[in-house]
Amino acid sequence: MKVFVTGGGGFLGRHLIPKLEETGCEVIAPRSKVCDLTNPTSLAPFNSAKFDQIFHLAAWTQAGDFCLKYPGDQWIINQQINTNVLAWWSKDQPQAKLITIGTSCAYPEDGPLTEDRYLSGEPTPSLYTYAMTKRMLYQGLRALGQQYGLKWLCVVPSTLYGPGYLSEGKQLHFIYDLIRKIGDASRGGDPPVLWGDGYQRRELIHVEDFVRDTLNLASISSNELYNVGLGVDYSIREFAVMISEIFGFPPEQIVYDTNAYVGARTKNLEITKLRQALGGLERVDIRTSLANLRP
């Protein structure tokens, strides 16, 4: 099977590509220096191959308050990237199934995070622009699939974590920020200061579990959106206690900055649809996996 991957140099791509290759897939994953997806002609050089699957992982975003700082740039850059990939798929690679990555921040803040509500209500205000570009990407899949009879899949992860996360020049996802701050404090650094009151809740999904579920869904399902998560969320304070235990650090020394940015108060994906599609879900133990991330 021939597979094309955008964003292959990112955290998810560096876990997905080896799994694809293990199954015998021939993978083409050009880096942005070679294939600038904001350029409408950047994908034309790959038209000599006919791909069976296209995994679209590329997106212009970062964790933390990045979305607050660059909403205009996020809109233009991500819309350019997504439109160019969708156009290439529909015009030049219509035989391929396009698998894209959604975002949990596209869901409205009130009510359950079920797939039927992905386009409903207002996303979290601080993440609004990025959320809307992901909604537009999903609607692009549906529109082109309907008009041209194309096959697609959209998977929405909770926060991805696991080994090999590269943070150089980027803001850290919350779990890595907690590990860094508490780890530094355990080695004699300043007391860790965490954003918010600590009662905001988050759900993690180990990148290996996400890749496995996504590949399984890609082989059995088309023209659907699936949440892919752990099924359980924890407060930031609960995560902080888990990590403090790993480092032998007293959690009562943690300081919570209630004036800092926190994003959504809660993110816990409903995964009933995923369970119905895949049956029993294999999951990495969260406490063991967090311990393995210790630097």
Image (spheres, helix red, strand yellow):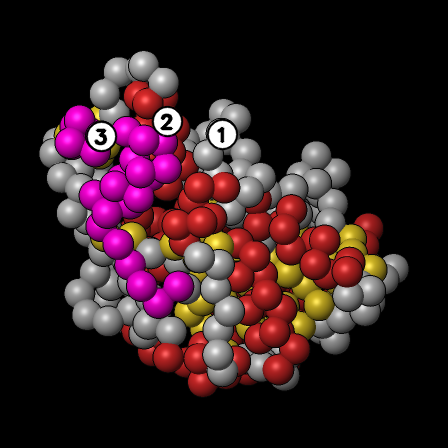
Range of the magenta residues?
A: 230-256
> Which residue sits at x=29%, y=59%?
233
Is label 2 in a helix, a strand or a loop? helix
Dot 2, how many residues are within 10 Å of its Cα: few (below 14), some (14-19), or many (20+)? many
Query: Earlier along the polypeptide chain: callout 1 or callout 2?
Result: 2
Could you give the CA–CA distance between mark 1 and mark 2, rounded to whole angstroms? 8 Å
Query: Earlier along the polypeptide chain: callout 3 or callout 2?
Result: 2
Q: Is residue 146 above or below residue 176?
A: below
Is label 1 in a helix, a strand or a loop? loop
Between 225 and 275, the residue placed more toward the observer is 275
| Residue 239 part of the magenta-drawn span | yes
Mark number, residue 183: 2
Corner quadrant of residue 118: bottom left
Q: Residue 247, how many percent across, how many down? A: 36, 31
> Which residue sits at x=72%, y=53%?
18
| Residue 250 part of the magenta-drawn span | yes
Q: Which residue is mark 1?
A: 295
Q: Which residue is mark 3?
A: 250
Is label 3 in a helix, a strand or a loop? loop
Q: Residue 34, how many percent across, how many down? A: 74, 38
Looking at the image, residue 261 sits to the left or right of residue 184; the answer is left
Q: Nearer the viewer, mark 3 or mark 2?
A: 3
Q: Residue 40, how many percent across, how many down? A: 66, 49
Q: Is residue 185 above or below residue 198?
A: above
